Amino acid sequence: MNYKIGITACLVIGITFLCGCTSTTEEVQPLLVYAGAGLKVPLDVNIAGFTQETGIQVIPNYGPSGGLYAQINEGQPADVFFSADWKFIEKLEDDGKLTDSIKLLEDNIVLVRSKTGEEKGIEKIQDLVKPDISIAVADPGAPIGQYSQNVLDSTGMTEALSQGAIKARPSTVNQVALMVEKDEVDAGFLYSSTASLYNLTPVQRFDTTQSGEIVFGIGIIKGGDEKRAKEFTDYLDKHTDEYMKYGWTRYA
Amino acid sequence: MHKKPSTIEILFIPAFFLLILYPICAILFHLTPEGIVTTISDPLFWSSFKNTLITAFGAAILATLLALGFGYYHMFNRDSIMYRIADLFNDLPIALPHTVAGLALLLAFGRKAFGFAGSTGLAFTVLAVTLAMFFVSYPLAARTIASSVDEIDREIIDVARTLGDSEGKAYVRIVLPLLGESLISSMVLCFSRSLSEFAAVIMFGGNVPGMTQVLASYVFTKVEEGQIDAAVSASAFCILLSIMLVIILRILTRRRHVRGRKPA
């Protein structure tokens, strides 16, 4: 009999404790910000500044934008979505899941080279057709791969490079960056922001007319803490200079 | 007379149908004629199919050969440090996230370490695809071989040893013939495991369509491109291939059981 009383007591204490937790957090509910993983470094600075200025706590959740989009779409609680691909903001908007959205940053495709690539004299995209050059271009299925393909098409390089210089078709931009950084290939195409993250100096920067527009944007999620989410978004809008340090430009 | 189904049966049957069989059927239900036509008329699909067969077969042979070495240690040298290390590492490639496996292989066999072997080292070649598949499927081979070694009667080996055979000789002359079909089931297992591998293959193999792309990464790419119809038909093709393999495995193992039974 005794153990039953014990278990009941434990349950009661446990439940009271849990209720206590939720009721205290409800009073100072932090803002839930979902953001593309590549944004982590500058966004962490922004979040610290915002909390200092307003006293509002922010909990960031970094991940691949497509995955975060799926989570929000499935109804996971979130207040702000900072997507590395405008496409996902558009999708949520079409489904009526956002109250507001803005295009904040723009990125570019850049050509980066590895140490060996530098020795082989890669200075511009036309150098990639030199003999014995191996490059990594992300699979056209991934967004980065599609933009890279656009650059190859618009510079008329697709045909020349189909002869075998493209040795690897990785599935994400980080894999391409890794291959170049570790000097396993001579060159690759990255986002300007990714190149900065991996300390790779771009040798050529491509205009968005060549790659297609690459927009990072913010959506305020319907049903979340819309008022403070707007406050946060306005703060980010005023502090985009943090992102300029890492290869982004402000969306014009 | 029907016997009353037990609680386990009542729980098992719906769970099995819902969680295992239904997802596989979902792929087949979503097949469209257009998807099938697009897929079978895509030369890149066939080149990835050909690559898959060659590399998975190569990986299966390599993995089984290495596993035979492990089997030797399992039979004769279980106290050695080498055996303990090998036994520990049998599980590692299974537990490792496969992008990590791909990265590990790239750094190990890329041009920084293996530059003498070509402009990209061993990476981004059909051989690299084989090595990636080998890396992830070897543990399965090692376990299959080890468990068949366990079934072998120690006395036969002891007799051979007392008659003057060295351990190596006894292994080749007595253990290997007794392993027989488990060599084949090890190869079939490794082959099937290799079919499904794409993360390590993309990172280390290269995933270039028509060159180093395999079925699993072909399907992955189609999904990423949003070409769901084509992805579904290619997946159905993979399922068909897997089912065929499983059936082969079944026939082989059943034969072994029948043969293993003592005559009355």
Image (cartoon, coloured by chain):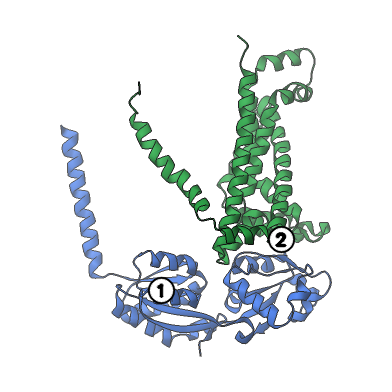
Q: Is residue A26 visible?
A: yes
Residue B228 picture quarter: bottom right
Q: Colour of chain B?
A: green
Residue type, mark 1 in image:
Leu
Question: What residue does disc 1 label?
Answer: A92
Residue type, mark 2 in image:
Pro
Residue B122 picture quarter: bottom right
| Label 2 Cα neighbours within 10 Å, binned few <14 / some 14-19 / many ≥20 | few
Which residue is at a point 70% across and 15% down the rendered structure image?
B156
Residue that sits furthest to the bottom in the current view: A252
- Who is closer to the viewer here, A80 or A50? A80
- Who is closer to the viewer here, B225 or A85? B225
Q: CA distance from mark 1 to mark 2?
A: 36 Å
- Which chain letter matches label 1? A
Q: Colour of chain A?
A: blue
Measured from the top left, where is residue B142 in percent x and y?
Answer: 65, 36
Measured from the top left, where is residue B28 in percent x and y?
Answer: 52, 51
Question: What residue does disc 2 label?
Answer: B43
Measured from the top left, where is residue A81 in percent x and y?
Answer: 41, 74
Marks 1 and 2: same chain? no
